[in-house]
Amino acid sequence: MRKRTLYITDLDGTLLRNDQTVSLFTANTIRNLTEKGMLFSYATARSYLTASQLTKGLPEKLPVIVFNGSFILETGTGKKLLSYLFHEMEVQEILNFLIKNRIYPIVNAFINEIEKFSYIQGKETTGMENFIRSHQNDIRKNPVLHADALYCGEIFHITCIGEAENLRPAYEHFREIYPSVLYRDMYSGDLWLEIHPRGATKANAVLTLKEMLFCDNVVCFGDGKNDIPMFRVSDACYAVSNAEEELKAIATGIIDSNEEDGVAKWLLKHVKF
């Protein structure tokens, strides 16, 4: 019996081009292969809302992984098949530390079962202003007047955008407690710190999705440090040529860049039916 393989890719810097689009070649290749039976999905740091908008040309068949593994969602409906949330005491610990150190975060939560990202008006860094400007018409945007309002709802993702002198100490403080990533955004160049609930990693989500789909193997593609956990649990893992060196060092192989349709070219050459 032929083994079932799940092919799963990061989006930004991997499947998406630098202009945040999927090329026609990549879209057509993936659509044709999935019609023949390829099991294909993505694992991204993005929300389902933005990821689904950017991948409209791709087939929506399998569940997807968003917010770096905080959720596995059913495509089309957005129904949560797996979710990781912060406990109330964890939220208190994280937000109290950040605000005490004058780091004012963007907090993603379900408030009355509606997804929102909240931030304190008047406390925005330049990087936060860039982010908010890029989400000007986002229905999830929820500016608040006081820090107390950041604690509302079911919180699943905390982002800080600022300078290294503030964010690096916070990263060092939290990295051993919660899955955390400190990196420069590939589009704006701003420094981001993302803090996730315990267990919320691409690795855990990929293994769960593999089990859900009764797959034997996982082949994954990526470009950044947040893909390292996913690479470590996959049977084969490929870094695009524009990937960070730390990821390349543990990859099964290096493929063409995101601008050269590296993922689609590899799939076209290697996926067999």
Image (spheres, rainbow, N blue to C red):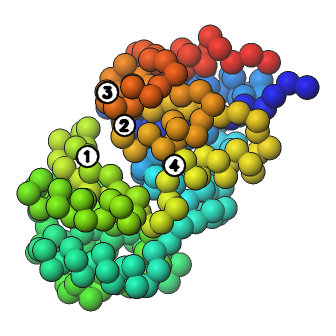
Q: Residues within 10 Å of mark 2 (few under 14, many from 20)?
A: many
CA distance separating discs 4 and 1: 16 Å
Which residue is the site of mark 1? 183
Residue 245: give its label.
3
Q: In terms of secondary structure, where does tag 2 sit?
A: loop
C-beta proximity under 8 Å, tags 4 and 1:
no
Q: Quadrant of the C terminus?
A: top right
User: Three-letter amino acid code at disc 4?
Assistant: Lys
Q: Residues within 10 Å of mark 4 (few under 14, many from 20)?
A: many
Answer with mark 3 or mark 2, whichever residue precedes in sequence. Answer: 2
**Residue 138 in sight:** no
Please identify, in this view, whether the residue under mark 3 or under mark 4 is nearer the observer.
3
User: Three-letter amino acid code at disc 2?
Assistant: Gly
Taking the spot 74% from the left edge, 16% from the top edge, the residue there is: 272
Answer with mark 2 or mark 1, whichever residue precedes in sequence. Answer: 1
Please tell me in which quadrant of the rendered image residue 213 appears. top right
Residue 224: give its label.
2
Answer with mark 4 or mark 2, whichever residue precedes in sequence. Answer: 4
